[in-house]
Amino acid sequence: MPQTESLPLPWSLLKEARDRLRTVTLRELLAEDAGRVDRDVLHAAGLRLDWTRQRLDAAAWDDLYALAGSADVTGALRRQHEGGHVNSTEDRAALHTALRLPRDASCMVDGRDVVGDVHAVLDSMGALVRRVQDGTHVGYSGRPIRSVVNIGIGGSDLGPRMVCRALAPFAADTAEGRPLRMHFVSNIDGAALDAVLRETDPETTLFIIASKTFGTQETLINARSARSWLLRHTDHPEAVARHFVAVSTHAGRVEEFGIDTRNMFGFWDWVGGRYSVWSAIGLPIALYLGMDGFRAFLAGAHEMDRHVLDAPAADNAALRLALVDIWNHNLLGACARVVLPYDERLKLLPSYLQQAEMESLGKGVRHDGTPAEHETGALVWGAVGTDGQHAFYQLLHQGTRWAPTEFIGVARPEHGLPEHHPILLANLVAQAEALALGKTEAEAAAEMLAGGMPEEDVARLAPHRSFPGNRPSTLILLERLDPRTLGALVALYEHKIYLLATIWGINAFDQWGVELGKQLAGQVQEDFMAAAQGHPHDPATSATIDWLRARLPGS
Ligand code: F6P
């Protein structure tokens, strides 16, 4: 989407800043901008954020703060935290922040203080966690629970899956002296559930059916298959009650499915699916870490909420993260952002952020339905370092396209091979430095000559062995990765997303873009089953349906 010609003042100033900095390299900025480290490194809620390798100077930052001011980000944050209906198309609040408020706080949603409701659900989650942990919640044959299978998709899967993996060193031992085995099934592909069921014992497995709407096809089909599997092993009258719990906002559908609502953990329509890890959707986390661990995760997020609400612009981690995205995407023209956690435990963070950011910010119209005036959400992708270095970094360093990168590292490991850690972190730091500074042809040539290479080879290879540099990155470093700091990190991204949406004037909390595919899938499914295609399709789709219909199981 092209930017409009008659830009409001903050955007015009930013364009001028961009033009002024166009020929200034990161090498120059890092060498000559003395206040850079003091100005562009921040500490918030246990995180160290470093924007020194962004192609920005103090004046450009000021222009970005002016843009944030003109979008009234402070007012927008206040409205959100006070329960305003910031989800305009669904006329709802988006109050995931209320899920991490302490018990004695208060937060009004449509005239009701919801903090009591939030803590009542946390307490009932705590009761189940205690019974599973101490072995008093037993399966149909009287044996304690050893495995948990979470069946859900999107926001009902990615958060708990990512957090359980990230916090595995903090898993609590049950009375049997080992942590629960956690499984996650999201894909409707039977291969996913089948693989998990093969590894689990019906006598000792607890299924969590997690769905905000309890109407999601993938989840309901997987849940039905899991229930049939259980009932093939036992006709115990309490089998479903002992082995199935539900997490949802929709009690009626839970009951219809056959789960007693006494075994249901509720949440509310003011919690968006991709913002729901803090709600009962976090039950797998609570079961795995114990309730104290889950509460520490919530407390870390709350600490970040306080920071984002209270810190002035230049000290505000979420706002600066958002403004750097504005700079890279709207001013410098990058269309993607690469998330690179240098920590095996954060392997699933890029997928989690893909949903959080792309479902929230992938919008083409503003709240009032008029076209967005600026490019909106970036393509978010990434992989754990150092794996990515041996896969796609070539393009990041020397390709004709560029994407800003976000490196995430943890200073202190939790494993028994600490000698690996300095090497891992050296790679993180080196990659950021290499992207920023690059290597000129002259430098590459000098290195090769010093290594004794003949001059004609040096001349031939120098262009291939040089690096343009000037490729920006942000560094996010954590002292430790624990429940508290992970909570703060995830909350930081949530706030960044809302601030970006505020500046772009779009709704971060709906997701109409997922509907068309779902609607058409229903029609295609009917056409697979019917003798002849009943729904009108384009010729390419019809031909594909015909080809598959002749081959699908049962045809
Ligand atoms: O289809 C997208 C979506 O609605 C996501 O926003 C959501 O997280 C996911 O589906 C799962 O929805 P539910 O929790 O209602 O099953």
Image (cartoon, rainbow, N blue to C red):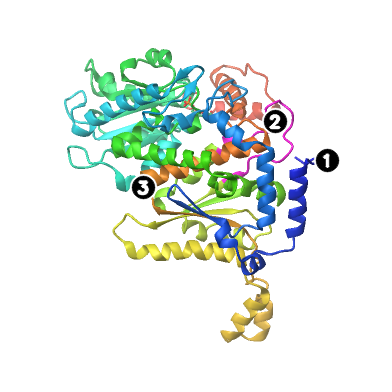
Q: Residues within 10 Å of mark 3 (few under 14, many from 20)?
A: many
Query: Type of residue at label 3?
Result: Asp
Please report whichever mark, 3 or 1, sits nearer to the chain's N-terminal start: 1
User: Quadrant of the rendered structure where residue 147 is?
Assistant: top left
Whether ligand 1 has any atom under 8 Å from the Cβ at mark 2 is answered as no
Local secondary structure at mark 3: loop
Res. 483 in view: yes
Residue that protrudes farthest toward the right in the picture: 5
First-in-chain label (2 vs 1): 1
| Residue 300: in magenta span | no
Label 2 – label 1 distance at C-alpha: 19 Å
The answer to whether residue 334 shows anywhere in this view is: no
Q: State the image coordinates of residue 400 (x, y, percent, origin top left).
A: 69, 59
N-terminal-most mark, 3 or 2 = 2
Q: Is residue 320 left or right of residue 8?
A: left
State the CA–CA distance, disc 3 to disc 2: 38 Å
Rendered location of residue 212, percent (x, y): 46, 24
- Name the residue that disc number 3 marks: 482
The residue where tag 2 is placed is 365
Dot label at residue 6: 1
Q: Report the magenta stretch's main SS.
A: loop
- Please identify the quarter of the rendering in which residue 114 is found: top left
Q: Does the magenta run of residues contain 366?
A: yes
Give, as a single range, the part of the protein colored magenta. Answer: 357-380
Of residues 154 and 506, the one drawn nearer to the viewer in this rendering: 506
- Count the numbered circles shown: 3
Q: x%, y% of residue 97?
A: 47, 32
Q: Quadrant of residue 423?
A: bottom left
Rendered residue at 72%/40% (across/down): 374
